[in-house]
Amino acid sequence: MKRSKTMELSVGLFMLAGILGLVFLGLKVSGLDLQRADDTFELRANFANIGGLKPRARVTMAGVTVGRVESIDLNTEWYDAEVVMSLDNELSGMLPDDSTAAILTSGLLGEQYIGLSVGGSPEMIEDGGVVRDTQSALVLEELIQQFVSNLTKD
Amino acid sequence: MIERISRLGRRGCDLLEAVGRAGLFLAQSMFGRPTMGGISLWIAQVYMVGVLSLAIILVSGLFIGMVLALQGYTILVDFGAADALGQMVSLALLRELAPVVAALLFAGRAGSALTAEIGLMKATEQLTSMEMIGVDPLRRIVAPRLWAGFVSLPLLTIGFSVVGIYGGYLVGVEWLGVFEGSYWGNMQASVGFFNDIGNGIVKSLMFALVVTWIAVFQGYDLIPTSEGISRATTRTVVYSSLAVLGLDFVLTAVMFGGLS
């Protein structure tokens, strides 16, 4: 059968194109990193209020993305939010233990992310360590409330 | 009154019977022992069902991506959020539009053809003659078509997404002037491989199963006259479109309903 050769070829190309498309989606669209699993280390931080922070939000340092938020859970002992972040391995053991983590907003209406800033202590945070100094999300309603109550006091 | 109730009961029995027949039919043809040369039958069907549907799927994907970018841009630019165009286009395509629209097109392009083909085989008594010479038509005719549809539609869906995202890029970045880095960057920041792409593929696998199942079963189960074939072909398109849209809501609720 002569026709079946070209048919087989086109089916093969079709399936190859599908797999290539999946690879394109993975790498270019979802930004999948192939060695992400073992190239990161964990860091914890407790916030009094996380605002609208979501899992998979960015963790930045000086504006550069250095990791992602892995999970957010309520800590029932202190009733605050426990955020687990995974950061690039090159920062492992490089962060002083008085570094701060703040929840910031990109733009006025943009998504929320965590900004890390380095402290000056000679002691470093190890893998799985905790960032002590944290700054909660800015909740616009609370801000307005404070502003209004200050206005009415005067 | 009694007459009406008994007619309703008869309808119900007929419906249940049809569902039961369709279920048995699916189980027998998908999990039956494959025939000799099953692979080459399957390849021929992937060609008929998948490769020949490629053109319509890719062209529709391109235009849908372009329209999404155009519509999204005019709305997002009011909020000064035109940079979020990439994430809007890619999430809309990957989660909803690519699986659903590809399945609808697939039902129209390939499903109706499957029904008509098998229906004509039944009308000209080819299926009966196959049984007579000891070839099981479920394995020889139906199984390769089911598996071909099951494999082809997810691949077509992936192609649809890729082309659609590229179409969004063409309109958003090349024409309307969204910054290229934010188009891809926001996309990569918000699309998760397993959450979005993986769930989209799971959706399209389900749709593939449902659409080819309906198409093949309608062909196999029709009344073997020319009118029967035309009605079964229509039913294939109607039932599979409804099934895809209904199932899509259920799947979306299960997959993305929990996402806050």
Image (cartoon, helix red, strand yellow):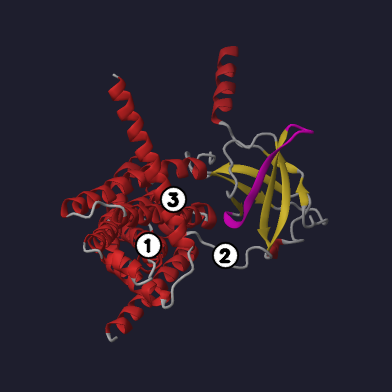
Q: Which mark is residue B23?
A: 3
Q: Quadrant of the C terminus of chain A?
A: top right
Secondary structure character of the magenta stretch overall: strand
Dot 1 lies on which element? helix
User: With A22 as the anchor, is A93 left or right in this view?
Assistant: right
Q: Is residue B64 above or below residue A152?
A: below
- Name the residue located 56 percent from the left edge and 16 percent from the top edge: A151
Q: Which mark is residue A33?
A: 2
10 Å neighbourhood of mark 1: few (<14), some, or many (≥20)? many
- Name the residue located 61 percent from the left edge and 52 percent from the top edge: A59
Task: Report, in whole angstroms, how far the alpha carbon at label 1 lies from the one at label 2.
Answer: 31 Å
Foreground disc of the pair 2, 3: 3
Residue at the top extreme, as displayed: A153
Q: Are marks 2 and 3 on the same chain?
A: no
Which residues, given as a range, are shown in magenta?
A: A63-79
- Residue B180 x/y as whole percent: 39, 60
Q: Quadrant of residue B47?
A: bottom left
* Residue topped by disc 1: B149
